[in-house]
Image (spheres, coloured by chain):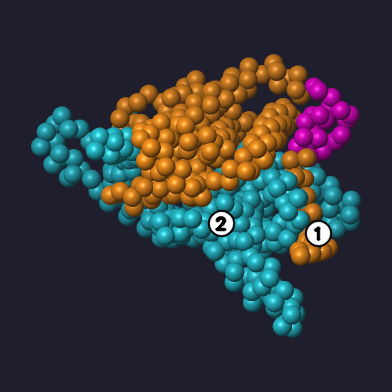
Amino acid sequence: MKRFGTVNLTALALGLAFLYLPIAILIIYSFNDSRLVTVWAGASLRWYRELLRDEAMLDAASVSLRVAFLSATLATVLGTLAALALTQRFRGKLLFSGMIYAPLVMPEVITGLSLLLLFVAVEIERGFWTIVLAHTTLTLCFVAVVVHARLVTFDKSLQEAAMDLGCPPLRTFLTITLPLIWPAVASGWMLAFALSLDDLVIASFVTGPGATTLPLRIYSEVRLGVKPEINAVCTIMIAVVALGLIVASLLTKRSASRSLGARV
Amino acid sequence: MQNTQQRDLVTRIAILMPYLWLIALFLVPFLIVLKISFSQTTIAQPPYTPVFDLSEGWEGLKQFFAALSTENYATLVSDSLYLWSYLKSLQVAAISTVILLLTAYPVAYALARAPRRWQGVLVLSVVLPFWTSFLIRVYAWINILQHDGLLNQALIALRIVDAPVTWLATDTAVYIGIVYSYFPFMVLPLFAALEKMDNALLEAAADLGAPPWRAFFQITVPLSLPGIAAGTLLCFIPIVGEFVIPDLLGSSSTAMIGQTLWLEFFGNRDWPVASALAVVLLAILVPPILIYRQRETRQYSPSSFRGAPEARARNP
């Protein structure tokens, strides 16, 4: 029997407080009527209204969302294929797994610099699509690791049974494997989306005119000092992400309980 | 058999697509960085010379190789600024990782011991901040650490200090920012390892008369070693090359290698030197990266195919 105890409770409480306090403060101050972060002047939606008038910020948000959507989708396809590849044996697998795991820990200044130099060398015009390519490359590795972790616990005998019965491999994948691993694939997509939405360093290197992402915009404003509109932007982003996560966890919980009988 | 051939073809294409993508967009860029690190900066587009141009033929190639030089590496070695930057980065990364380990362990332990009903929600709540923007979380600390920010207000109200303390643009702020941002990366691997631990072992130790602290250090900690190793690597390696946190919370004198590289590239427009910095940084980080890759792929060898509880634990 696991006893929980006061020490553990304190540790958890302190840990969660540490994690959430700065975010909570940010959210509270986004509703602060005063321009000064230090003085509370009553609650208002002033900064949200200012935000809606800020063309540059809205533009950046649109760019970020489109980049994130495209790169996440592409990364999920490639990452799932990569995860499947990792379960096979083939020549050159060592290099392959190296290329999958290295970007997970590689400092972003290195990947950003290398991708920019590639685009310059190949003379691709930097802008929206170079950011999409860069984000896809980085996030597909994360998707691969997430999906691979699921595939490892996946019962291969189902696939083998299908193929013994004459089902071609592509159809086996689409009708058997994919439906059973889809929560992992969906998690991978969400992770790729969040990573792309959030990326600053790589986007800084590979961006071009007219392709300012939201982090780039926020970063350039933040360097000039704390601004209440930024609090508002951040609060909105936090709300969107939190909502997405809650919806996702509810969906997976429902599908998990449904397939509890078919434990694969 | 037609089916077998088909299987090979489809599988082969499925493997090739990500493989080729990664070679083109991950491997080749590194080779280019390597090449540029041997080039010289120039006022031109692109701002380096020589430029690799196959149209010049064999003569062009020979000229190309002759124009490469190790000048940039000589610069790195001669100017102590760069050496100091690398050392500073390693120092910050090492200290941050230790702080992370010490602060994340109790939280991970508490998570592992939590009643199963609550574990899901609690783990989700630890992970949730990670899903919000990295930039936002660092920015949140600027709010707090400002001269007239909340930390100073709280300290003055509690009579701990008399006047506002300068937090921003110090190393302390950078450490706070790093520990805050990388916290989930340390908690999750630790949690995964601790959660697997069989409580019967602790019960047995208690039955044999061991006090709780001794059971902790002789049983729990050694068994969580894979989690400690994973968390340490997952944090240390990227922290060395961190840019955003030292840039926003630190000062130019913090001068971690990420900042130095950024400055050389965007500030001085010296792509060759920036490339040389990247190559050396990569050389320093390759051993831990290899160790990390080795650990991660070892768990999934065909022999451990069915028994992969660690894989389940890593399922988000």
Q: Colour of chain A?
A: orange
The answer for how far apart the CA atoms under marks 2 and 1 are is 29 Å
Q: Which mark is residue A10?
A: 1
Q: How crowded is mark 1: few (under 14 residues within 10 Å), some or many (20 or more)?
A: some
- Our reading of the magenta stretch's main secondary structure is loop
Q: Relative to A110, is A125 above or below?
A: above
x 76%, y 64%: residue: A2
Locate residue B87, reporting x and y percent. 49, 60
Left or right? Give the position of A198 relative to B149: left
Locate residue B201, reporting x and y percent. 66, 73
x 53%, y 39%: residue: A181
Q: Which chain carries label 1?
A: A
- Same chain check for tags 2 and 1: no
Q: Which mark is residue A63?
A: none
Image quadrant in which the N terminus of chain A is located: bottom right
Work out whether residue A123 or residue B315 is closer to the camera in this orientation and state it. B315
Identify the residue under disc 2.
B309
Residue A4: in magenta span: no
Q: Residues in magenta?
A: A25-46
